[in-house]
Image (cartoon, rainbow, N blue to C red):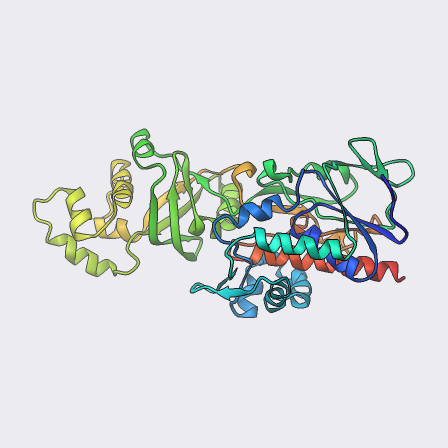
Amino acid sequence: MKHPAAPAVAVIGGGPAGLMAAETMAAGGLAVTLFERMPTLGRKFLMAGRGGLNITHAEDGRKFLARYGAAAAWMAPHLAEFSPEMLRDWCAGLGQPTFIGSSGRVFPTAMKASPLLRAWIKRLEGLGVRFVTRADWTGWDGQSRLRFANGEVFAAAATVLALGGASWPRLGADGGWTALLPDVAITPLRPANCGFRVPWSAHFAQRFAGQPLKRIIASCAGQDVPGEVMITAEGIEGGAVYALSAVARELIARDGVAGITLDLRPDMSAEALAGRIAGGGRESVSNVLRKRAGLAPAAIGLVQEARHGGNTAPLAALIKALPLRLTAAFGLARAISTAGGIARAELDENLMLRRHPGLFAAGEMLDWEAPTGGYLLQACLATGRAAGLGVSAWRAG
């Protein structure tokens, strides 16, 4: 492996955080080599953009920052230094203008990740960034050089780790890096933006798995989230569930179960529903729910499932607050993102590991989480940039 001229710096991980760190350092005059264990760059980035790349969000700054929960305070300066507005300008600079959707989410006009990634890689190549793929980092050798599974080594003046969390491991990030930092405090990696197991009856699971519940409101521990829920054979997932995943996951860890409720007709009050249902006469419950309450088959199935399970609440009450028991989060392989990671106390203000001078970390490796809606990519890019600037500052003394 040929080493570039000093000062040579390395990035390990070819996702959004690593690519942004590489861009920032290369623009600052450093010779950057980026190592990626997979055959190509940005695999998770491309997967995230399959249904339309939600790159950031246009909501008010204070509300935006609150999406990062307990990590909001220490994430604040990085998000201020690379804000959603700056991210949109950065996209435009790559020839990929963006627009704000009706929900406030921001998308590239092309609605795909691939054009943005191609333009980004071209920019990085123009800045002199060198890419080495199929490079599986395994730690350091006795001379403090980066060591790779194929036996090759690389002497870096500074390194940015951007190895991701442990979600979607088939795309490259499996959390194995935790074993390479034994002296660093790491909050255990857990699924975030994930689905949950619900103990359905066999009949319900077989009949309704794969069907959506649209335009509902899901509630858990005082939080209400409008959106969509997808029924699976094992439980539920979907946007409204992902937004509640952090609080539901912690309730399960504490109590062994989390209770959520679904408002199946948020556009109608309980009183109005009760009035409609009262005129049902001798109609079957299914007909009342379909004709008078206006429920879709999957929602009717949920109400019937609750009744067959012994819930004796009035139909209108069930429709407005249908209870579900979440018994476990789906595993990391099915999660959109990862909670946990390198503890904040291990990092200085420039995201350098205090125990390892010259070693920086960015992206999902750090202990933060956020819901879907653009917040994940925004934070990965912002921390990647912060780590890149941190390397330049550290190299400058």
Does 217 sit left or right of 118 as displayed? left
7 horizontally vs 97: left or right:
right
Q: Quadrant of the N terminus?
A: top right
Q: Residue furthest left?
A: 282
Q: Residue furthest toward the top?
A: 202
Residue 210 drawn above or below residue 223: above
Q: Position of residue 366 (x, y in %)?
A: 68, 50
In the rendered image, residue 91, in percent from the top left (x then y), is placed at 61, 62
**What residue lies at 69% left-to-right and 54% top-to-bottom?**
122
In this rendering, position of residue 82 left or right of residue 391: left
Whether residue 357 appears in this view of the structure is no
Total count of labels:
0
Left or right: where 381 falls relative to 275: right
Residue drawn at (41%, 34%) of the image: 234
Picture coordinates of residue 156, whole percent (x, y): 86, 47
In terms of depth relative to the viewer, which is nearer, 375 or 186? 375
- Figure quadrant of the C terminus: bottom right
- Which of the 4 image quadrants contains residue 126? bottom right
> At 76% across and 54% down in the image, what residue appears?
347
Q: Reply above or below: 83 against 300.
A: below
- Closer-to-camera residue (31/145): 31
When asked about the image quadrant of residue 175, the answer is top right
